[in-house]
Every structure is written in C-alpha cells, then in structure tokens.
Image: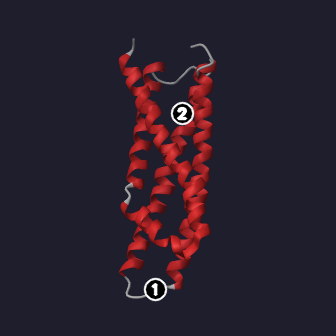
Amino acid sequence: MNVPMIVLRLIHIFSALVWFGGNFTVTTFVSPTAKAVGPDSAKFMQRFATASRFSTSMAIAALLTTLSGLIMYSLLFKGIAPLNTGAGAALTFGGLFGVAAFGHGFGVQKRTSDRMVALIKAMSAAAGPPSPEQMQEMQRLQEKMAAGGAALNILFALALIGMTLSEYFAF
C-alpha cells in the first residue's frame, strides 16, 4: 500500500471538488441569479465578494489541487510521462488542462475578483451613489468574471476527462 499516494490523491480529489464545485456553482447559479434579480442583489454580492472568504477558499483549493497533482505525477513518472502509453498521455493531457486552469484562476479570475472588491469598497466609502464610471467598470468586471468562470469550467472538464480516462489504460 502506497500511503503517500493515497493521501495525495485524497487531497487532490477533495480540493478539486471544492475548486471546481465552487466555480461551477457561482458561474452557473449564483451570478446569473444575482444578475436576474438586479440591484436588489447588490448587498448579497457585496457581502459575498468582500466577507465570505470564497476567493481565499478557491485559491487554497486551487493550490492544493495543483501541487498534489504535480507531486503525484512526479512520483508516478519520475519526470515526464511516457506519452506513448494511454495512461501517460491521458494524465499528461489532464494535468496540462489542470495547470492551465490554475494559471487562469490566478492570472485572470483572482486579479479580476480583487479589482471588484477594491471597487466595491471604493463605492461603499463614497458619500453618494456610485458614479456612472464605477457602474460601467463593475459591469465590465462582472462580465470578465462570468467569461473567465465559463472558461475555467471548460478547463476543469478537460482535466477531469484526461484524469478519468487514465484509469482505463494500463500503466
């Protein structure tokens, strides 16, 4: 029994579940519902963005998923997987999409989320209602988050396909 691999796999699966599940839930249900509700959802979304620790939870889950996956890949293959084997090709395929999701999550989603939080705080600190420029910027950031969340869902699905298929090929 390879206890380190079992522990790494559990970390990988559970943190990926949190990361993918959180992104899927927000992009598929929370954000579209908030958009449909309109201005009445502002307080909820403000609280969700600034005080829920959702962004931090997603960052931790992304980091744990990626690091545990890279460590398992390294332990399995001692470097680069043999791409002429089904399992090696499938895990490499899945891993590349997982690493791309990590890069997109930190490079696009987290930066956009941080800008949204800063804008929300600036709008809350202002004496009056948000300016038209602030509202336009918020709309732009929300659209960027929605598109980025959809892109992440595709990357997650491709990573999952690769990793799932690897189970059906002999090492």
Residue extending furthest bottom?
128
Q: Amino acid at mark 2?
A: Gly
Q: Is residue 68 visible?
A: yes
The tag on residue 95 is: 2
Q: Is residue 107 above or below residue 100?
A: below
Q: Secondary structure at mark 1?
A: loop
Q: Is residue 76 above or below residue 66?
A: above
Judge the density around disc 2: few (<14), some (14-19), many (≥20) Cα neighbours within 10 Å: many
Colouring scheme applied when the structure was drawn? secondary structure
Q: Is residue 158 above or below residue 131?
A: above
Q: Amino acid at mark 1?
A: Pro
Label 2 vs 1, first from the N-terminus: 2
Residue at point 43%, 49% (across, down): 58
Q: Quadrant of residue 47?
A: bottom left
Q: Nearer the viewer, mark 2 or mark 1?
A: 1
User: Disc 2 to disc 1, how far (Cα)?
Assistant: 46 Å
Q: In the depicted view, which residue is nearer to us: 99 or 41? A: 41
Q: Is residue 65 above or below residue 137?
A: above
Where is residue 2 drawn, in percent x and y? 39, 14
The tag on residue 169 is: none
Q: Quadrant of residue 168?
A: top right
Where is residue 42 drawn, in percent x and y? 49, 72
Where is residue 139 drawn, in percent x and y? 56, 72
Residue at point 46%, 61% (across, down): 113
Q: In the depicted view, which residue is nearer to us: 83 or 28? A: 28
Residue at point 38%, 52% (across, down): 56
The tag on residue 129 is: 1
Residue extending furthest top?
1
Q: Secondary structure at mark 2?
A: helix
